[in-house]
Image: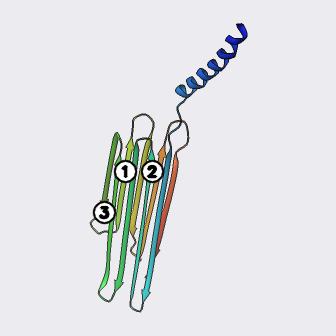
């Protein structure tokens, strides 16, 4: 009788210990950060043009944040013109985003951040510029964090142009 009780008690105790360990130590949630950037330039006699863009996103637990920026400039016989756009979005318990392009359309910023209040957060920031010399640049930095480890990070940037 005693050997029969040990035969079933030990496996049952081991199973309960494993179940208890899984309840006390939940699996870690995934965190990620990524981005992409692109740019190009062209010249011809009497004119030039350049474009650039970058964007990124980050996610951790129930939070996410993304930003993007793009700019272009062209120079020809009629003068120089440029355009720019930036934007961002965030999702989560405490989420905020903002973006701004200055009135001359030569400097833009976008930022987005979400925080769940328990140590999980995501953020992304993009800075896009049109320089006086005709070059354009854009850089995006994204980060996501979970408690118990380092944040996931991504930085992408691109610069393009035909300086005059």
Q: Are marks 2 and 1 in contact (CB under 8 Å)?
A: no
Local SS, label 3: strand
Alpha carbon of mark 2 to alpha carbon of mark 1: how far?
A: 10 Å
131 left or right of 32 in image: left
Mark 3, residue position: 101
Q: What label does residue 3 carry, if any?
A: none
Task: Specify which label sits upstream in the sequence, 1 or 3.
Answer: 3
Q: Residue 78: give x, y in percent of width and height.
A: 29, 87
Residue 99: give x, y in percent of width and height: 31, 56
Observer-nearest of 32 and 117: 32
**Which element is circle 1 on?**
strand
Residue occupied by mark 2: 58
Crowd around label 2: few <14 · some 14–19 · many ≥20 (10 Å)? many
Tag 1 residue = 112
Say if 154 sits above or below 18 in the image: below
Q: Distance between the residues labelled 1 and 3?
A: 15 Å
Relative vertical location of residue 9 with respect to residue 23 in this rendering, above or below: above
Mark found first going from the N terminus, 3 or 2: 2
- Which label lies toward us, 2 or 1? 2
Which residue is nearer to you in this view: 10 or 120?
A: 10
Residue at (44, 57) in percent of width and height: 56
């Amino acid at each position: 009788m005693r050997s029969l009780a040990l035969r079933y008690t030990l496996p049952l105790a081991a199973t309960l210990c494993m179940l208890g360990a899984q309840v006390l130590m939940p699996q870690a949630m995934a965190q990620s950060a990524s981005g992409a950037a692109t740019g190009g330039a062209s010249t011809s006699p009497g004119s030039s043009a350049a474009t650039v863009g970058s964007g990124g996103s980050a996610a951790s637990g129930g939070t996410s944040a993304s930003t993007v920026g793009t700019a272009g400039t062209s120079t020809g016989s009629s003068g120089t013109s440029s355009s720019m756009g930036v934007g961002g979005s965030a999702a989560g318990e405490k989420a905020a985003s903002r973006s701004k392009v200055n009135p001359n359309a030569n400097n833009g910023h976008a930022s987005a951040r979400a925080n769940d209040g328990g140590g999980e957060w995501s953020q992304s920031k993009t800075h896009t510029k049109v320089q006086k010399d005709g070059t354009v640049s854009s850089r995006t930095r994204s980060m996501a964090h979970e408690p118990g480890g380092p944040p996931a990070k991504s930085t992408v940037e691109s610069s393009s142009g035909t300086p005059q």
